[in-house]
Amino acid sequence: MDPQPNNPLHGITLEKLLNELVTYFGWHDLGRQIDIRCFTHDPSIAPSLKFLRRTPWARVRVESLYVDMLTHGKQVI
């Protein structure tokens, strides 16, 4: 496996990424940042992961928000 030092998503699972976003923003603010039903109506990790894995445009938006969070020094422990 080739290392990807310039790719902030390398080695990060979608589940870990989503958990960190939820920890940082909370479901309510995450739903305001990315207006998709799985974040705004009865949100939970499992259905959100299922939706994101099947919906490329939504996954791109979530990954982009995560990279923005990292870029602006807002890492979650």
Image (cartoon, helix red, strand yellow):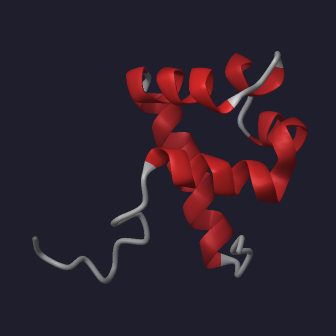
**Residue that appears at 69% across and 74% down:** 75
In this picture, is 23 found above or below 37?
below
Q: Is residue 36 visible?
A: no
**Residue that appears at 34% across and 66% down:** 10
**Residue that appears at 61% across and 76% down:** 71
In this picture, is 35 found above or below 30?
above
Q: As drawn, is 61 to the left or to the right of 23?
A: left
Quadrant of the rendering where the N terminus is positioned: bottom left
Q: Is residue 3 visible?
A: yes
**Residue that appears at 83% across and 53% down:** 25
Splitting the image into 4 quarters, where does residue 54 fall? top left
Q: Position of residue 55 (x, y in %)?
A: 44, 23
Q: Position of residue 63 (x, y in %)?
A: 51, 51
Q: Position of residue 32 (x, y in %)?
A: 84, 36
In this picture, is 60 found above or below 52?
below
Farthest residue to the left: give it.
Answer: 1
